[in-house]
Image: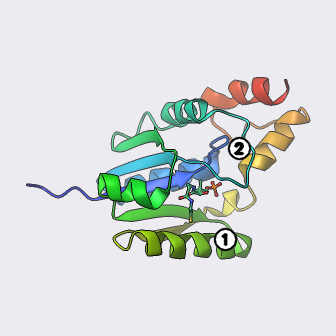
Amino acid sequence: MKHTVTAICPGSFDPVTYGHLDIVTRASKMFERLIVVVASNSSKKSSFTPEERVEMIKKCTADLPNVEVVHYEGLLADYAAEIGATAIVKGLRAMSDFEYEFQMALTNKKLNPNVETLFLTTAAENMYLSSSMVKQIAKMGGDIESFVPDFIRQDIIDRIKK
Ligand code: PNS
């Protein structure tokens, strides 16, 4: 039986941005199967339901045949074990991300020793980009064209400006 190398790319994606999509696209070239996991971050209040976030990511990744998008409510380490994923891929923007990401990587390793966390350095143009920044700009009527794809731009504006 052929062994498929599966990786997961988790996040809250509230909403997905070009920064996330750059990481997903690059990771999709490194693994046979990449599953984008919309998960809950207990320290963040979300603006979009998990189902809405999944739909937005699906629209933006339709051209990547080995990418799937799911919502998982639970521990990421358990999900990785359930589907036999061997890697968690995350983007790292700046030193400010490091401590938090390092803590999560070590915790996930403790919970599931079979999964490795790999960090991809973010593209230079996305260093400053975050979902919360996109929401803030949309709320104040700013242009979010350079931060999110056209497919989802109006959905974000409609939700945030409400
Ligand atoms: O995009 P974010 O908010 O930085 O992503 C964080 C996320 C959602 C990946 C993280 O909070 C997570 O893994 N949540 C699922 C629950 C879990 O496994 N928590 C323990 C992580 S050490």
Q: Name the quarter where the N terminus is drawn.
A: bottom left
Which residue, given by chain and number where applicable, does mark 2 sit on? 147
In front: mark 1 or mark 2? 1
Residue at position x 27%, y 59% in the image: 5
| Residue type at tag 1 | Tyr
> Mark 1 falls on what kind of element?
helix
Q: Quadrant of residue 136?
A: top right
Q: Is residue 111 left or right of residue 50?
A: left
Which colour scheme appears in the figure?
rainbow
Q: How many marks?
A: 2
Residue at position x 68%, y 53% in the image: 42
What mark, if any, has residue 100 been given in the picture? 1
Farthest residue to the right: give it: 140
- Badge 1 crowding class, 10 Å Cα cut-off, few under 14, some 14 to 19, many 20 or more, is few
- Badge 2 crowding class, 10 Å Cα cut-off, few under 14, some 14 to 19, many 20 or more, is some
| Residue type at tag 2 | Phe
Q: Report the Cα–Cα distance between label 1 and label 2.
A: 23 Å
Q: Quadrant of residue 77?
A: bottom left
Q: Position of residue 54 (x, y in %)?
A: 53, 35
Q: Name the quarter where the C terminus is drawn.
A: top right
Q: Position of residue 138 (x, y in %)?
A: 83, 35
The answer as to whether callout 1 falls within 8 Å of ligand 1 is yes
Q: Is residue 34 left or right of residue 25?
A: left
Whether residue 145 is visible here, answered yes or no, is yes
